[in-house]
Image (cartoon, helix red, strand yellow):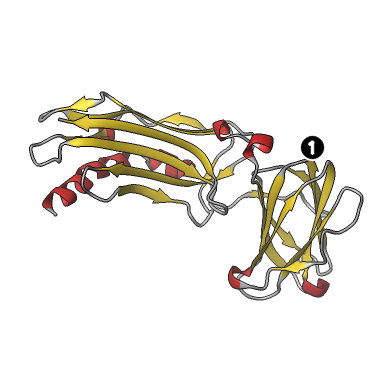
């Protein structure tokens, strides 16, 4: 137990490399265009908007080349009026009647395989009564067709691959990047695997979808004082370790980026 607590305490130095990333994150998504809202969206977008005035219907257009599988999720306010959406095919026919976000979490989603053309998402209040805020998230579930993992990057590098007593394990790079032209909702995980122990979570943030990696963001937070993770002492288990970084899409859990860094303590 003392070894486990010691390793966790030592590795928490990684947290000190992240403050400027946290300050750069933008809660929520990007605002929709002004009323009357009728705009094009694309895969990975998280849109924040409002149904106002009463009777308002917001339109969002999604262009597909065909074969993409998309998850479109509408989330309304936790109380008050309920948000609804309709998804229309390129030929104008609805995929279904209005689906309303009145269930658990006040959200509803369409999981659809797209045909070529321009799809239309219509958002309104239930029965066209009342006004309300809502968010609309469009995520591609077939990354080979509409967004690859290389668009979003987490990169961790260590100063060496083998350590002995007295060596310091140092992260020479801790880099996060978003090469897309729009913010990306992300769940970030940094973890350490230690021989004979369960994996240790160093950072676990963004599972609720409120953490965003800004558009065109690219920053390396190391070297810095907090990038010296820990010094190897005789109490550390000998064997294979791994420091890993993962970025996930919060709604689907889809892997956006992964970097594994195995190393050995002899």
Residue at 26 percent of width and 30 percent of height:
263
Q: Residue 96: in sight, yes or no?
A: yes
Residue at 84 percent of width and 68 percent of height:
55
Q: Quadrant of residue 16?
A: top left
Please indicate whether residue 56 sits to the left or right of residue 252 in the image.
right
Q: Quadrant of residue 83?
A: bottom right
Q: Quadrant of the C terminus?
A: top left
Residue under label 1: 65
Please indicate whether residue 95 sits to the left or right of residue 184 in the image.
right
Residue at 68 percent of width and 43 percent of height:
43
Residue 245 in the image: state x and y as whole percent: 40, 39
Helix or strand or loop: what does disc 1 sit on?
Answer: loop
Residue 26 in the image: state x and y as whole percent: 54, 47
Q: Is residue 55 above or below residue 187?
A: below
Residue 22 in the image: state x and y as whole percent: 43, 44
Please indicate whether residue 12 sits to the left or right of residue 205 in the image.
left
């Amino acid at each position: 137990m003392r070894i486990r607590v010691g390793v966790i305490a030592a590795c928490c130095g990684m947290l000190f490399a992240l403050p400027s990333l946290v300050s750069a994150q933008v809660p929520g998504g990007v605002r929709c265009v002004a009323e009357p809202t009728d705009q094009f969206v694309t895969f990975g977008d998280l849109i924040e908007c409002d149904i106002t005035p009463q009777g308002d219907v917001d339109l969002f257009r999604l262009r597909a080349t065909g074969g993409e599988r998309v998850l479109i999720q509408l989330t309304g306010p936790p109380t008050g009026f309920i948000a609804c959406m309709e998804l229309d095919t390129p030929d104008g026919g609805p995929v279904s009647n209005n689906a309303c976000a009145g269930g658990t979490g006040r959200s509803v989603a369409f999981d659809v395989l797209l045909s070529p053309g321009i799809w239309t998402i219509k958002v309104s209040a239930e029965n066209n009564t009342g006004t309300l805020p809502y968010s609309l998230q469009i995520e591609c579930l077939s990354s080979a067709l509409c967004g690859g993992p290389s668009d979003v990057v987490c990169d961790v590098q260590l100063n060496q691959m083998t350590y002995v007593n007295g060596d310091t394990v140092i992260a020479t790079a801790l880099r996060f990047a978003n090469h897309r032209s729009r913010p990306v909702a992300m769940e970030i995980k940094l973890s350490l695997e230690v021989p004979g122990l369960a994996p240790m979570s160093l950072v676990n943030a963004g599972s609720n979808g409120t953490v965003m990696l800004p558009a065109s963001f690219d920053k390396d937070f190391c070297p810095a004082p907090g990038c010296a993770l820990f010094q190897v002492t005789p109490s550390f288990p000998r064997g294979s370790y791994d420091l890993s970084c993962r970025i996930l899409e919060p709604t689907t859990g889809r892997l956006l980026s992964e970097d594994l860094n195995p190393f050995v303590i002899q």
